[in-house]
Amino acid sequence: MPCRKCKEEPVIKLPNSEVSLCKSCFYKYFEKKVFKTIRDYNLIEKGDHIGVAVSGGKDSTSVLSLINEFAKERRDVKVTAIAVDEGIKGYRDESLANLKRFCEKEKIELHIFSYKEAFGKELDTIVKKFPRPCSICGVFRRYLLNTGAKKLKCTKLATGHNLDDEAQSIMMNQFRRNVKVSARLGPITGVLKNKDFIPRIKPLYFLMEKEVATYAFLKGFIDKYSECPHTSASYRGNVRDFLYDFEAKFPGTKHNIVLSFLEVLPLLKKNEEYKGSLNYCEICAEPCSQKVCQACKYVETVVKQI
Amino acid sequence: MRVFIERSNEYKEVKAISVKELLIHLKLNPTAVLVVKNGVLVTEDAPLKEADEVKILSVISGG
């Protein structure tokens, strides 16, 4: 079946659809969807300095490339790449090398913050004592991205989260009865507006993982797709696999999960109970909901025990 | 034909006349993979010949 638009050889059959597109029509489809998300949700505003959270992987490199293209048309928008080095040998070192090459080629300023420098240990060391480190890693990564973005005076932090990621998060929160956390999801995250919280934007929000992988492959951003070696045993890994299997049997499920969620998100955000109270960590002075932030708690209870 | 499966880093010998048939044979989810035939990305509808070089990439990446 040739490309639906121009009859050239197709490179992708769009998810949940019989529409096949060639490379050039797919680029147009993908980029149009990203720029529409940016417009519809006002993700990038006048004068924004966008910190793009990057790892060198398919999602973040794609979003960095597109935001960089967007900023070239808008002189008032600045772009900086922010990476976190968790210290995962054979995975992060390779993707960061890829990232450095990309940023050099595109002349994008890149800043890297590491677990070793910030918290004292690499993830490969932490995982020897705590074999399911995803919760710890997530807290540490978000901490470094938030503090890094503030240090660099970013007004927004863009991430490469795609529709699959969002569907997984929504379902994880449902399964764990964690609706309060879902209030922070969406194409632009956050419940409380505060100068110490940099809003996060997700330009790839409505694109599926396969679509992003296809874009990154065709653009030559990466030549291999690797998974964090600590992921598959995680709760998210299980939810991810379940959703992939379910989607294969019932196409459109992931889209429906996200679209249904977006209908109730405004109600969740209005709920005062979900806003929580804002405190400042007694140890690092970062904003948090308790006396000590989760990152500092993990440093005390996990890192210092190793 | 010889098929390289990146996720498991292995080669397999498979007989299939289309990408769709290949993925069914290998029990792979079409929404979770990219299929590269002779260096070019193809869809599930693409035909396959014995002499084709096929690589299967998992789209699931990151952490």
Image (cartoon, coloured by chain):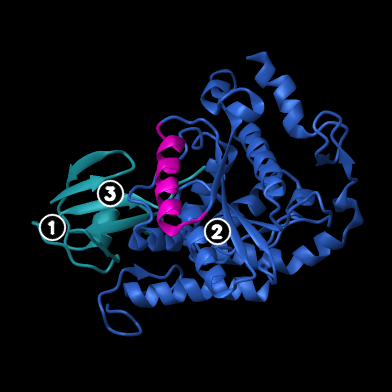
Chain colours: A blue, B cyan
- Quarter of the figure with residue B21: bottom left
Q: Earlier in the sequence, mark 1 or mark 3?
A: 3
CA separation, marks 2 and 1? 33 Å
Secondary structure found at label 1: loop
Q: Residues within 10 Å of mark 1 (few under 14, many from 20)?
A: some
Q: Chain of mark 3?
A: B
CA separation, marks 1 and 3? 17 Å
Confirm whether circles 1 and 3 share one chain.
Answer: yes
Q: The disc labelled 2 sits on which kind of residue?
A: Asn
Please name whichever residue, A242 or A29, is drawn nearer the observer in this view of the structure: A29
| Residue A107 position within the rendered picture, expressed as x and y whole percent measured from the top left | 46, 57
- Residue drawn at x 75%, y 29% as measured from the top left: A296
Q: Which residues are magenta?
A: A90-108
**Which quarter shows the N terminus of chain A?**
bottom left
Q: Chain of mark 2?
A: A
Q: The disc labelled 1 sits on which kind of residue?
A: Asp
**In magenta segment, residue A103:** yes
Q: Are marks 2 and 1 in contact (CB under 8 Å)?
A: no
| Residue B11 position within the rendered picture, expressed as x and y whole percent measured from the top left | 20, 41
CA separation, marks 3 and 2? 27 Å
Q: Residues within 10 Å of mark 3 (few under 14, many from 20)?
A: few
Q: Which residue is mark 2?
A: A162
